[in-house]
Image (cartoon, coloured by chain):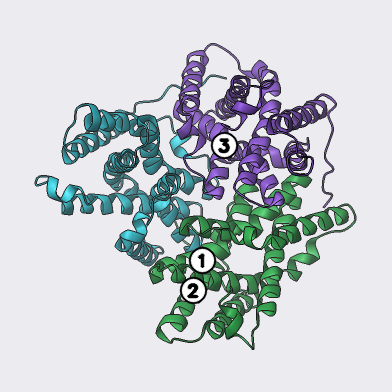
Chain colours: A purple, B green, C cyan
Amino acid sequence: MDYLQPLSPLWGTRLHMALELAATLAFALSGVIEAARKRLDVVGVAVVAFAAAFGGGTLRDLLLDYRPFFWVAHIEFLWSVVALCAAAMLFMRQQHLHPTERAILWPDAIGLGLFTAIGVDRALAMGQPALVAVMMGVITSVFGGVLRDVLCNEVPRALSDHRPYALWAFAGGWLHCVLLTLAGLPPWLALTLTVVATAGLRLVSVYRDWQLPSWHD
Amino acid sequence: MDYLQPLSPLWGTRLHMALELAATLAFALSGVIEAARKRLDVVGVAVVAFAAAFGGGTLRDLLLDYRPFFWVAHIEFLWSVVALCAAAMLFMRQQHLHPTERAILWPDAIGLGLFTAIGVDRALAMGQPALVAVMMGVITSVFGGVLRDVLCNEVPRALSDHRPYALWAFAGGWLHCVLLTLAGLPPWLALTLTVVATAGLRLVSVYRDWQLPSWHD
Amino acid sequence: MDYLQPLSPLWGTRLHMALELAATLAFALSGVIEAARKRLDVVGVAVVAFAAAFGGGTLRDLLLDYRPFFWVAHIEFLWSVVALCAAAMLFMRQQHLHPTERAILWPDAIGLGLFTAIGVDRALAMGQPALVAVMMGVITSVFGGVLRDVLCNEVPRALSDHRPYALWAFAGGWLHCVLLTLAGLPPWLALTLTVVATAGLRLVSVYRDWQLPSWHD
């Protein structure tokens, strides 16, 4: 997000990039874990990791007709996921990956907030209405996980888990819209508040085990 | 379809819009019903409803490189599906949804014909060959349901149901091509005839329980 | 690939086209076989055949924002798959399709190499970095099969089969990049070498039953 450079002495482009990279790797790692659990081969692990990490942003950019994709503009993200897959393959015979599921909870929650805010930003910057921008935020943060689960032949967890996930992206997207347009906050401040609120709600709802209402058929 | 405005004293833009909205809501409702049956949570129900309602038109516009998407140009459609999901959630603990499956048969059949004709129209207007236009018609009317079933981890019903559905979209697409280009009918008349023929064939094949031949392996 | 015409006295546009058609039909036939095995109806068989044959190239062109799609520019490919589906339906009650699985091994392997090389070519011609070009090659040759398996509600075979397939596309893509850019070979020669190497590796790994390492959870 180039517009952040002059505006964010506090948040800072480097911190922003580091967080985005951490979130991307967390999403990729969730793909590695799920693919390994389904006993896919090394190619399957890599494909599912890429789909989880880049699926959401790619679908958003496809729908918004925005090029180049962020993984073309920042090809170091692509190489990072390649490196992650290579590292995962080295560990693959030696180590159980269950403990890492806890470990990705925090970067995953930060990624949820960050990707939502980035998606909303991009859609608003391209002149989309607020509802469309919020949907783009949700798609950015959620579609990677949906694609990961579809490739692994599972009902997507984001749709069936009963723990709120996409819901916080939806709420965070509206918050970001309001902060940016109605409240007129500077972008870096709106981004920070959105990420803190969305990631915070996600973490609280996991630790307190909040449940979405289910449908009694 | 703006070109209809001066041409259709009979069919009329308002009737056309009302039918398109009814069809979109019927597709969304089919998503709600299937998601509820698979015990997805409220977020899953909403996502599957959106995918069913807007998946076909979105893929068509992506493939044709046509922007803005119809749900950006007519954002009231998006809000209508949001309202439908909200309403469905209110009913969700109180009522069984089985009777509604019959209720969506008619709008679903009209949507099949209408979305096919709209897809063919758009592709022909963009100078695509007839076979491509017919495929766009089929994609518009069928892909939403396919996406709905893939998200719910089912073999798509349109592909395995053995009751003709996509086949009528295919036939209706060719009919629409012939009426528009060879017969040179005015758009509103071609649209009306295509919708009546496609929806009629679909309804007859449901009520008479026509079966597609199956493959003996 | 128009640029091949003046450059390839040896390989030749006609041979190239014939091979590409054979590969497309082999991919379509793999869709027919899988759809028949899952007892889809005739519409499902046709849809899965189209998805298998054109899914990879379509996703590549969508991601690269390249229009018209190759199946719009070469609509005879689309008609060929229509004809293949029609022919398959005639045989559908009379004949078992198991022997054909062996029969598509060769065109499928050639398609793997050819589609990889074509994908890399197109991405490089549009100025993409090498890693992105290789990914486009892999997507071109692999995504059709992934889509086929997702539609049939299976874990994609390319991800779980443990026999190297996408891996050879990945390796062949890098080979093609190196031959074209570093070695500076003429396109037709690079294409020939890539196809021979990729298809050869695929065939050897099937006949010798090479296995990818699996993940011990």
Chain identity of mark 2: B
Residue B40 visible in the shown view: no
Compare residues B93 and C8 and report the one nearer the observer: C8
Question: What is the residue that sits farthest to the front in this orientation?
Answer: A6
The relative height of residue A20 versus residue B198 in the rendered view (above or below) is: above
- Quick check: do tags 2 and 1 share a chain? yes
**Mark 2 Cα within 10 Å, few/some/many (few <14, many 20+)?**
many
Q: Amino acid at mark 3?
A: Cys
Query: Badge 1 is on which residue?
Result: B138
- Give the distance between the C-alpha atoms of the residues marked 1 and 3, in whole angstroms: 27 Å
The residue that appears at 65% across and 48% down in the rendered structure is B152
Compare residues A139 and C113 and report the one nearer the observer: A139
Q: Nearer the viewer, mark 1 or mark 3?
A: 1
Q: Amino acid at mark 1?
A: Val
The residue that appears at 64% across and 88% down in the rendered structure is B10
The relative height of residue C56 versus residue C130 in the rendered view (above or below) is: below
Q: Amino acid at mark 2?
A: Gly
Q: Are marks 2 and 1 in contact (CB under 8 Å)?
A: yes
Counting from the top left corner in percent of width and height, residue A60 is at 58, 44
Residue A152 shows which numbered tag?
3
